[in-house]
Image: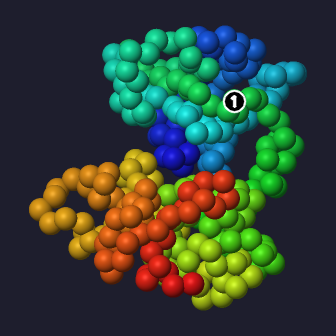
Amino acid sequence: MVHVDARRFEERMRGRVVRASSPQGRFDDGAAALDGRTLTRTEAYGKNLFLRFSVPRGASGPRAKPWLLVHLGLIGGWRWYDAAARQTDGRRLRGADGSNRRVLLQAGRGEHAVSVDLRGAITCRLVDDGEADLVLSRLGADPLRADADPDSAYATIQRSQSALGTLLLRQDVVAGAGLIWRCEAPFLAGVAPQRLGRDVSAQEWSALWGHLAGIMAAAVDRGGAEVTTLRADRPPGTRRVRREDAFYLFRRGGERCRVCGTRIRSEPMGGRTVWWCPTCQPG
């Protein structure tokens, strides 16, 4: 999750001079423009990570752009390493070399050294304040941000004849809600994903937003581990939450609902599969 990435940058690199390179070569100019600058701020908004760097006095061109904007897409990811080059966080790599490292950022020396690389992202570019504001202007409310405005999201939903499950994937409506959350939050709120946006009541939206914010924040606190089920709804005697026990609906089509025992159904919606329980989410 992008908010997990932002937290790690905040804790490990903010306030430090960063050395930047592009082992892959596709970000050579950007890395050269970042090299030797200080990370001063981190911002996560939806699926976008903004890293703000100091701007040298009199800088022009790429070195005058303060923000590194990254959107991971479906396969991108940051991987963190300690001073001994051992990976500490991020998706594990098996048998991979550095040929697909878009950017490598390093800070500190000796035992205090830390590094992070980026692979597979769909967006990795330097932007100025105006370009950053333009990206933000196109995004809806982010449930993980303190400045989120759920009322603005609801105003858009109320005007729409699209299904709720489709609207929750629109980043201009709810920024950061992906496939898991668009299934699990409506289930917890008791609202079917097929419900048209205009037919979602203010009370239902309030409940749904509360569940969205809660389960997404819990995932951030767990370092990105996504779990929505309560202990009472998981098999007894298990200490760690197994992936197959983590969700109420996601990828459980045909299985029994953990709450009522009804078989979970699925269908295409908004170009992706959605799962729901016809008993717990009657309409």
Placement of the C terminus among the 4 image quadrants = bottom right
Residue 88 visible in rendering: yes
Q: Residues within 10 Å of mark 1 (few under 14, many from 20)?
A: many
Position of residue 131 in the picture relative to residue 216 (left or right)? right
Q: Report x, y in % for residue 233.
A: 27, 71
Residue in the image at 76% along x and 29% along y: 126
Q: Which corner quadrant of the image does residue 19 belong to?
A: top right
Residue in the image at 70% along x and 17% along y: 27
13 to 61, vertically: above or below: below
Position of residue 245 in the picture relative to residue 192 (left or right)? left
Q: Report x, y in % for residue 72.
A: 61, 37
Q: Report x, y in % for residue 129.
A: 82, 41
Q: Give whichever of 114, 180 is nearer the camera.
A: 180
Residue at disc 1, secondary structure: strand
* Residue position marked by numbered label 1 in the rendering: 124
Residue in the image at 79% along x and 43% along y: 132
Count of marks, rendered view: 1
Q: Give whichever of 252, 169 is nearer the camera.
A: 252
Residue type at tag 1: Cys
- The residue furthest left is 237
Q: Give whichever of 273, 107 is nearer the camera.
A: 273
Q: Give whichever of 222, 170 is nearer the camera.
A: 170
Residue in the image at 50% along x and 25% along y: 116
179 to 130, vertically: above or below: below
Position of residue 149 in the picture relative to residue 23 (left or right)? right
Q: Report x, y in % for residue 118.
A: 56, 26
137 to 233, vertically: above or below: above
